[in-house]
Amino acid sequence: MDNLIIPRHVAIILDGNGRWAKSKGMPRNYGHVRGAKNLERICEDAWDIGIKYLTVYLFSTENWRRSRDEVDALMALFRSYTKTCIRTAMDNNMKVRVIGDPSAFADDLQESLKVLEETSKNNTGLNFQIALNYGSRDEITRAVRNIAQECAGGSLNALDITEEVISDHLDTRGIPDPDLLIRTSGEQRLSNYLLWQLAYTEFYFTEVPWPAFDRQELLRAIEKYNSRDRRYGGLKEE
Ligand code: IPE
Ligand code: IPE
Ligand code: MG
């Protein structure tokens, strides 16, 4: 891996917890528990490999459509995961940020998420973004609403709205766009993830379900990324 170019920002759609559990004859929720454990490991591996930003999709604005039981189990898991994450963030010097709209979550979970962000905000290791009740269209809608309000209030002129202004109103403000997007478990769609931010990102899809995705798989994705010819609309020098 010595001469690999390491992507600065990796975004992951961690998919397949349910199918992985089913293949083991276990309930879907067991897959979520193991998926959360795996996330802790991958954070360490990512930093160790040299990745500076990691953004993971944990719960989409569409995931409320799942059964009541599954949503409840996921909320319980986020509660315990957030508490564990406060500890691991401090142990591993990780700076954690929530993207999405956590206002739909129970008060205690919102509070823990704030504590997690606040406690870890001066850490200088991995920048770890967790997407919770995240949907790209919702994020863009909220941004447009805020921009419109600034225009109405007179602090912003409509003609001064640039791509940069829009980026600065997204939940990901200040975070560089992802270089590599990984989706596990075979599906090849974005499911409303980072639509604006992924404009020039390389995509990597793997059949491996999230609970089985390990350091080796991450390195495989990075190797594949290295074989791509990133042009950004131009041509590279020969
Ligand atoms: C990803 O695994 C985790 C969440 C979306 C919360 P899934 O729960 O989507 O697992 P599959 O895709 O049904 O196997
Ligand atoms: C996307 O996975 C959302 C997360 C990983 C949190 P889903 O499994 O919910 O996506 P769809 O429904 O198959 O598109
Ligand atoms: Mg899924």
Image (cartoon, rainbow, N blue to C red):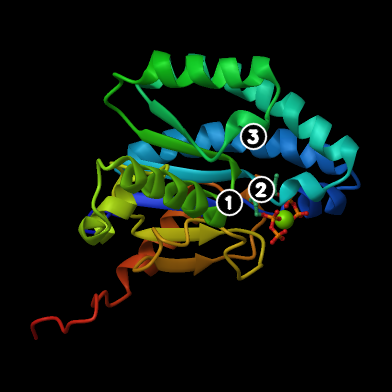
Label 1 and label 3: CA atoms lie apart by: 20 Å
- Looking at the image, tell me whether mark 1 or mark 3 is earlier in sequence order: 3
Point 27% across, 43% down: residue: 154
The amino acid pointed to by label 2 is: Thr
Label ID, residue 61 = 2
The amino acid pointed to by label 1 is: Gly
Label ID, residue 36 = 3
Q: Looking at this view, is 91 or 198 the one in front?
A: 198
- Looking at the image, tell me whether mark 1 or mark 2 is earlier in sequence order: 2
* Residue 22 horizontal side relative to residue 143, left or right: right
Q: Looking at this view, is 217 or 11 the one in front?
A: 11
Pointer 1 with pointer 2, Cβ within 8 A? yes
- The label nearer to you, 3 versus 2, is 2
Point 25% across, 41% down: residue: 155
Which type of secondary structure does the marked residue at label 3 adopt? helix
Asked whether residue 216 appears in the rendered view, the answer is no
* Number of marks in the rendered image: 3
Classify mark 1: residues with Cα within 10 Å, few (<14), some (14-19) or many (20+).
Answer: many
* Residue 233 horizontal side relative to residue 139, left or right: left
